[in-house]
Amino acid sequence: MLHVTDLWKSYPGADGPVAILRGVSLELAAGATLALTGESGSGKSTLLHVIGGLDSADRGTVRLGEVELTALDDVGRARLRRGTVGVVFQQFNLIPSLDVARNLAFQARLAGAEDPAWTAVLADRLGLTAHLRKYPEELSGGQQQRVAIGRTLAVRPRLVLADEPTGNLDEDTGAAVLALMLDLVAETGAALLTVTHSERLAARMDRRLHLAHGQVSP
């Protein structure tokens, strides 16, 4: 479902362009899970952002099903993120002025794909039903990340990208949140690509790739 081919990305440096990605290629089937590991600064988040349409590549292609994401303009990439690709960040990025119920429904409403019954199922599975009228500041970190995951899955995306999704949580809370995310992603049939430093998280994925010096290896 996801095909990344010969992806290159650089950023300006004091002495000229600094290459972050150097010909990265990978594939991920629908319903499969993949962990991307690597040292800090190795380009993991950059790769995730290019795949998610949050950043553009210098060259190479990212294809989601029949759609070539790297050929889209900003508007096209934004439209894809609203419905086809869901992103879960380490920072929860909830809207502080909206309660849990409205945060959960926010992305689905933007995509014109709100399904109150499915959102209710997500709230129940994520242990949020009793907190729907609370605001983000009233929640624990684990609860906020559950809201972020629910918001992403409310549109039933085909691809979920998770950037250190348990990085701000203690080990036990992170393990519980990860288990819920994996169960729910499996129910939707989405593919999951997660960037992580956690061996515990990486071990739960179907397979892993390591990014170093701008290239991936098993």
Image (spheres, rainbow, N blue to C red):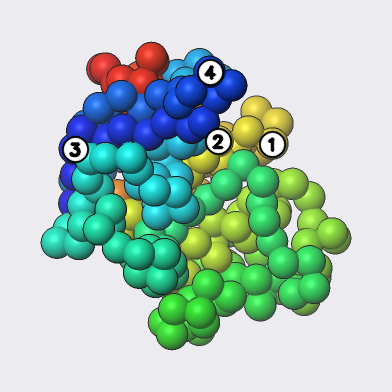
Badge 3 or badge 4: first in the primary sequence: 3
Residue 143 position within the rendered picture, expressed as x and y whole percent measured from the top left:
70, 53
* Secondary structure under the numbered disc 2 in the rendered image: loop
Q: Amino acid at mark 1?
A: Asn
Quarter of the rendering containing residue 100? bottom right
Quickly name the residue at label 2. Answer: 164
Residue 188 position within the rendered picture, expressed as x and y whole percent measured from the top left:
33, 62
* Residue drawn at point x = 36 percent, y = 27 percent: 21
Q: Is residue 4 left or right of residue 35?
A: left
Label 3 packing within 10 angstroms: few (<14), some (14-19), many (20+): some
| Vertical arrangement, residue 103 with respect to residue 162, above or below | below
- Residue lying at the far right of the rendered structure: 138
Tell me if label 4 and label 2 are in contact, CB under 8 Å: no
| Vertical arrangement, residue 138 with respect to residue 207, above or below | below
* Real-space Cα separation, disc 3 to disc 4, in angstroms: 28 Å
Q: Amino acid at mark 2?
A: Glu
Q: Is residue 128 left or right of residue 112?
A: right
* Real-space Cα separation, disc 3 to disc 1, in angstroms: 32 Å
Quickly name the residue at label 3. Answer: 5
Residue 93 position within the rendered picture, expressed as x and y whole percent measured from the top left:
67, 56
Circle nearer the viewer, 4 or 2: 4
Residue 89 position within the rendered picture, expressed as x and y whole percent measured from the top left:
57, 47
Circle nearer the viewer, 1 or 4: 4
Circle nearer the viewer, 3 or 1: 3
Badge 4 or badge 2: first in the primary sequence: 4
* Secondary structure under the numbered disc 3 in the rendered image: strand
Q: Amino acid at mark 4?
A: Asp
In the picture, the disc for residue 168 is 1
Q: Amino acid at mark 3?
A: Thr
* Real-space Cα separation, disc 1 to disc 4, in angstroms: 35 Å
Circle nearer the viewer, 3 or 4: 4
